[in-house]
Amino acid sequence: MADRGDQHTIRLQGHVAAAGLTTLDWQEQLNGGSTGHCRELVVVADAVLYYRTELVADLTRFGCPPRSESTGDLIAAAVRSWGDDAPLHLEGDYAYVAFDTTTGRGYAARDPIGSRPLYFVHTTVGLAIASAPSALVAAGFASSALNNAWLAELCAGFVNVGSETAYRQVAALRQGERLRFGVGVTTAVDQWWSPPAFTEDGTSRVAFADAAVELRELIVSAVRERLDPQRATFVSLSGGRDSSAVYAAGRRLAGDRVRAISLSYPVGDPGREDETIREILEMCGGQPRWIDTDQLPLFRLQGTGTIRPDAFTHPYESPTAAIADSAGAEGGRIVLNGLGGDTLFHSEHSFLADLVFAGRWVDLRREWRLQGGGFDPAMFFRWGLLPRLGPVARDFVAAARGGRRLQDVWDPPVPGWIRGGDDTHATIRERAWREPVRELRADGAGDRERRLMVLGPFAGRVVPEYSRVSLSRGIEQRSPLYDSRIISFAATRPRAERQRGGDYKRLLRAAMEPWLPVSVTGPRLNPTGFSGGYFRRLAMAELPQLIGTQRDKLIADEAGLIVAKKYRAELHRFTESGEHGQLPALVFTALVESWLRSQSADSDRR
């Protein structure tokens, strides 16, 4: 974990030998300290807390004022006051471990979004906890034996099934979960936070215009809490509705101390939003700081495997690193992003199935027409019925179709290069459906879609990867739109404010209408900002380099994860045509292969 900063060790009395952390000095100064005490309670945290004034007031009223307003002392006082319910009273980006040196009891927890990871392993002498699975292996607490079932799923593009990791013995504490442990206590993990229900009609009766004003005020408060109080704060600004809302709020609060960094795509590329970004800057103020994607490689993995903590790597690691480097070059420490906007204020088509099952035929007919749907029975089944079906019903439909599955975003096909045939492929799908967030609650398919976006397997890896990549370059990522107040508010609003026909993010756009140009707040007939062109173009050039020549052995093949010949054939087909229906799986397989090679090289060095 050397890429996280300097090492600090804390000697404890009682049942624990030591606790320690690696952290950047400026993080300690900005966030007020990552270690804390409250009487006999000791805390080590990877955290930043927001709304500290309210928290101090709550702790004081409870009769347990904190020793100081440092992050560690605030968490220690919260755990001392509320025990394992402390996370219910905290707003921030955090993973912490708290230990009572008198009783030998401890707690660990992660925030609802999970930007700061936490892993654990049971050993012969107790429990070891760390921010990276590779740290537990390097320290000798866990074996380096790999979890081949999980790695095969990752090669197939099925990410983060359950709490498993690339290492067989290491488990991940998932976002919104807490861990209880201690002397004479059975170690237990449970979920302390679950996303609120997102329903068709919502629960709020506040008028649309008033709700837009309320949302704008919530965004301003969330951004205010996350600004750097001493230096310029940077925003990774696109031409979309999410990051632009964060930028506009930041400029209103801090003027030129809030600055933009943007990716520039070539003319004609579907990701290009340069002109819209300039309009945002003209209205909100500020100068453009461009990162030319033509000069930006997709993969920055060669030679960096030793600091990759797990096999999962965000495919857009390189742009994230470039944004962090740009902010750091200008003395920045904080980058705000627009993560959460799609999750909370957008919607896909799953809600159509809810209208069907509720018998709301008038609403269904209107939405189907607005979506451009005509007489297409297969498409109607895909969106009007399939989102409400579970794995057993889907298997029945597949059997009725001669083994051909009807796919949707929650049930993608398993690539043919995954070793093991039909039985292995069925196991991968079955394990994916064990995800608790895939459960269909009474609120329906639209609610399940939102929960999968917030707590789902892919999001559970992407958000901490943004944090990890940026922190390795001395930058802290913060996500104002994931503020718990905004999440709770968004869940009260009706689905039509997220999507009506092809009109998306209606409420968010209305909230920012006074502060952003109409190119952002108005409807878009031709959506922009899709980075798929950049991704596909560079993947065509770089994937063969990552995999090597035909003569090179693939470790993923030797490990029994894939069939190299089939994978190479599909990769060749992609590089020749530029198209592939399973491009994400092609990329994840290459990234797993790269990670396996780094593990092999690291083992050889040892």
Image: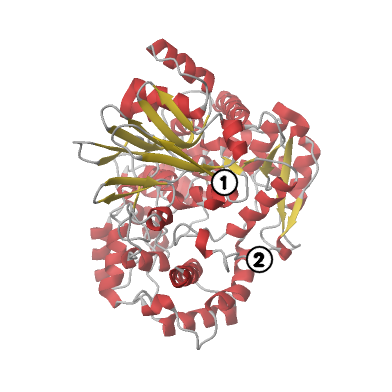
What kind of element bears circle 2? loop
* 501 or 166: nearer the viewer: 166
Going by the numbered disc 1, the residue's amino acid type is Gly
What kind of element bears circle 1? loop
- On the image, the x and y values in percent for residue 111 come to 43, 37
Q: Circle 1 sits on which residue?
A: 5
Q: Is residue 421 visible?
A: yes
Going by the numbered disc 2, the residue's amino acid type is Pro
Instruction: Tell me where residue 216 sits by quadrant.
Output: top right
- On the image, the x and y values in percent for residue 106 come to 31, 34
Placement of 458 over or under 189, stated as above or below: below
Q: Is residue 517 visible?
A: no
- On the image, the x and y values in percent for residue 461 come to 45, 52
Placement of 514 over or under 239, stated as above or below: above
Name the residue rendered at 73%, 42% in the picture. 331
Q: Judge left or right: residue 340 versus residue 526.
A: left
